[in-house]
Image (cartoon, rainbow, N blue to C red):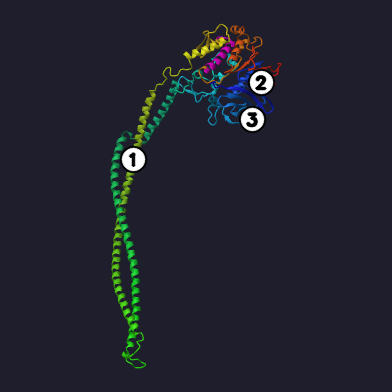
Amino acid sequence: MPAARFILRRLAFTGPDVPVSDLDFVPGINVIWGASNAGKSFILAALDFMFGSSSLPEIRFLRGYERAWLTLDLPETDTITLARPISGGHFALYKGEVDLRSPGQSTQTLASDHKAVKNLSLSAFLLGELGIHDKQIDRTLNAEKSTFTFRHVAPYVLTDETSMMADHSPTRIDEHSTETFTKNVFKFLLTGIDGSSTVTVEKSETQLRGNAGKLELIVELLAAAEEELRQGWPDAGNLEEQEGRVEEALGSVASQAAFRQERLDELRLRRRAALDEMTSLEDRHTEVLLTLGRFDLLAAVYENDIGRLGALSEGGAALLAGARRPCPHCGADPEHQRHSHGLDEIERTYVAVEAEVAKIRAEQADLQRTIVGLRAKRDGLASSIGKRAAEIEGFEAAIKSEQPLEGSIRVSYERLDQARDHVRQGLAVQRRIEDLRARKREIEAFKPTTLPRGSVVAGIGGSVGDEFAADVQAILHEWRFPGAPRVSFDARTHDILLNGENRRGNGKGVRALMHAAFKIAVLVFCRRNGLPHPGIIGLDSPLLSFRDAHTSRHGALDADERAVSETGLNRHFYDYLLRTAGDVQYVIIENDRPPIDLGPGARITAFAGEFGEGDRKGFFPV
């Protein structure tokens, strides 16, 4: 399976009133050569800007341009186009290639800061394309960490002219990075091992400063606590005895309070029972009164009925008395009269009325006996209600007499409880003082902790360094570096030694060649060991040894540079690029045309310069 890699496609700058300035790239070899001050070096700076550096070089040709654009292929997202204001800031991401004059709506915004929270950062996005997520690098031997970002990869992808010929190690990221951090970034690139598993320990000086600050704070807190004890508890020497006495007094008062409370509870319970009973008696008394009222009405009805029936009885008796006389018309005696004129019916009615009256009088007698009984019950209930009312008044009086005693005891308890709280606060201050004094003794006896020797080892060494040095040596041999060089890795400086000699002792051109071999060897090492690498190598002036000493601003050649320039190394250099370009995208900035034909797959771009002759004066139109 091919290794994940980036492929540059197009770098461009646009503005509202200026023509588009752009440069296309092929996946293999891209060579930009020509006159000085034509914008060749600006290309690497612009690529670095689009990979997240903070700013662009200030050149006059940028006047009128507003945005920078970079189109590239990525292993996961495929082709994208990034846009960024030339003043810096966040990136707009577009899927695929876009019309630079009318790009449409971007897919998303990528923050320029790797620590961004709101938006995904460009660094996290690019590292994610390489399968690198959330890596931590030890920046000190105490294992203090920094987050690994794409800005730490960029120096291994794009190398400007100044860095190419510099005498510091090619592993250097920037002037702000510590030596330990720089070495550990290199270690991560060549081994895939970051600092996530190491335990961070502060530096001894930091620990001592922090400890001194803690001691100062403890002393201040201790003095404040001792003053608080003096002010609030002048007799603090016997606070425990005071607490015991207060506890004893509280126990006694609590017993009295419990007795009084039980007495009050009992009285209230009995009062409640009496009230409930009186309510029941009153309900029954009311019911009897209502019944008596109804019975009085019934007695009146009986009297009325008897009066009415009495009148009927008297009328019937009168009729019957008159009916037993001789007939006033014929003078016949009653026993000789033919017609009775209804006397039988009158007699029967009279008998019925007398019977009804007798019945009513019997019921009337029963009613009177019932009424007498109810009146006796009414009087008994009234008497019971009076007794219960007297009992309730007695309970009320007893409760009122108990309440002042219970309130007095409660006040005494609250006063003693407050006194106990005050004593306990004093005891708490004493315990705090004891804790602060113990903490003060611990801090005064503090000794800085250090990591065991070897817990954090900066960079690489041993077999990894030897294997990497062998890759650098193989590249120099393929370039036909004069003298069959022997390359070794210096674990102390994290630089390569040429025939046992430090690279600093060589001329600018030789240092540039060795730097170029170093950066290409990193990619070779990563590919062989299945480690992530963007797959781009951008080098500015790797063949500085082949400069014209009379016209170059870098002056005359040193002896080792002359030895190189008298060989065909530059031809073998480009031949090596041709043989390896299937897996690597090269961007080479040089002053001279390649000495061999690089074939149709390569892109050769010549900048004639502002005053030169040629189709293209520079990156920007003149």
For disc 3, the marked residue is 103
- Check contact, mark 2 vs mark 3: CB within 8 A: no
Magenta span includes 507: yes
The amino acid type, in three-letter code, at marker 3 is Pro
Q: Quadrant of residue 513?
A: top right
- Residue 180, numbered circle: none
Q: Which residue is mark 1?
A: 419
Q: Is residue 385 visible?
A: yes
Q: Quadrant of the C terminus?
A: top right
Residue at position x 29%, y 49% from top? 262
Callout 2 environment at 10 Å: few (<14), some (14 to 19), or many (20+)? many
Q: Nearer the viewer, residue 381 or 523?
A: 523
User: Callout 2, which amino acid?
Assistant: Phe
Question: Dot 3: within a 10 Å radius of its alpha carbon, few (fewer than 14), some, or many (20 or more) residues?
Answer: few
Circle 3: element type: loop
Q: Amino acid at mark 1?
A: Ala
Residue 54 visible within the image: no
Question: Is 384 drawn above or below residue 230 in the view shown?
Answer: below
Q: Is residue 27 magenta?
A: no
**Residues in magenta, as a range:** 505-527
Q: Nearer the viewer, mark 1 or mark 3?
A: 3
| Percent of width and height locating residue 263 | 28, 50
Of badges 2 and 3, the one in the foreground is 3
Q: What distance separates the C-alpha of mark 2 from that of mark 1?
A: 89 Å
Task: Look at mark 2 in the image and give the residue it sits on.
Answer: 619
